[in-house]
Image (tube, rainbow, N blue to C red):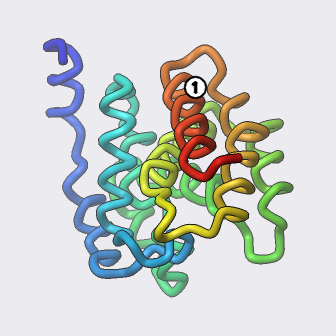
């Protein structure tokens, strides 16, 4: 990490968002057969963005820490986030990547691809990298893995074309295809 990246991270006030994410400690990930917990997934998503050098956008990084908060804990008061530094913008991004209960997954992902903000596409890509990294034969039925890879190839990868996130997603999809034999 170069000095300017380190300085950008040091100036961000991530701690209040990490504190909000701790509400997810010990919550099992629904889509992953309970093999991991939600707090670690939020931290992993942050780490993926930092690894890919997205360190200059505090809204993106803060949103990564709580991107599943309202899905997992729907009684969370949005005002608690709104009151934090960058809270209004972070909430906007978090709600942009939160699937409404009444919307089909493929329609939701297509909407992000077609009209979502650049940050929503980056956050969805980092989120998907974390999810694909946790895809194992002992916790996923093959039909789920196949659908998940197809969603990634159709809706997530095109949104981050030309980035290293694209390369990592392609590699993960190939790995999962090999593991599951499809």
Q: Is residue 132 left or right of residue 84?
A: right
Where does the image place residue 17, in percent across and percent down from the top left?
30, 59
Using the rendered view, name the quadrant where residue 39 is placed: bottom left
Q: Is residue 7 above or below residue 30?
A: above
Q: Of helix, strand and loop, which one carries label 1?
A: helix
Query: Which residue of the protein is positioned furthest toward the bottom in this rendering?
Result: 75
* Vertical arrangement, residue 140 with respect to residue 130, above or below: below
For label 1, the crowd category at 10 Å Cα-Cα, with few meaning under 14, some 14 to 19 and many 20 or more, is many
Picture residue at 22% right of the left edge, 46% below the top: 13
Total numbered labels placed on residues in the image: 1
Q: Residue drawn at (29%, 81%), measured in percent from left and top? A: 26
Residue at the outermost front position: 181
Tell which of 150 and 6 is nearer to you: 150
The answer to whether any part of residue 63 appears in the image is: no
Q: Residue 10: x and y, percent? A: 14, 33
- Judging depth in this view, the residue of 63 and 27 nearest the camera is 27
Report whether 9 appears left or right of 89.
left
Q: Quadrant of the N terminus?
A: top left
Rendered residue at 78%/62% (across/down)? 105
In this rendered view, identify the residue nearer to me: 26 or 66: 26
Q: Residue at x 43, y 49 (%)?
A: 133
Q: Which residue is mark 1?
A: 166
Q: Nearer the viewer, residue 108 or 174?
A: 174
Give percent across and percent down for residue 45: 39, 48
Q: Is residue 124 visible?
A: yes
Image position of 8 (left or right of 137): left
Horizontal and vertical percent position of residue 71: 56, 74
């Amino acid at each position: 990490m170069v000095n300017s990246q380190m300085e950008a991270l040091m100036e961000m006030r991530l701690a209040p968002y990490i504190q909000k994410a701790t509400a997810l400690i010990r919550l099992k990930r629904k889509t992953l057969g309970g093999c991991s917990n939600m707090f670690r997934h939020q931290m992993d998503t942050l780490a993926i963005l930092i690894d890919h050098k997205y360190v200059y956008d505090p809204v993106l990084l803060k949103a990564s820490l709580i991107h599943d908060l309202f899905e997992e804990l729907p009684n969370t008061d949005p005002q608690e986030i709104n009151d934090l530094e960058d809270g209004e913008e972070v909430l906007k991004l978090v709600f942009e990547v939160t699937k409404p209960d009444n919307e089909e997954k493929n329609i939701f992902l297509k909407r992000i691809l077609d009209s979502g903000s650049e940050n929503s596409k980056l956050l969805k890509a980092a989120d998907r990298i974390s999810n694909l990294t946790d895809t194992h034969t002992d916790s996923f039925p093959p039909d789920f893995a196949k659908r998940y890879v197809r969603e990634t190839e159709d809706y997530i990868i095109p949104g981050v074309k030309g980035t290293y996130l694209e390369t990592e997603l392609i590699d993960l999809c190939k790995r999962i295809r090999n593991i599951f034999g499809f």
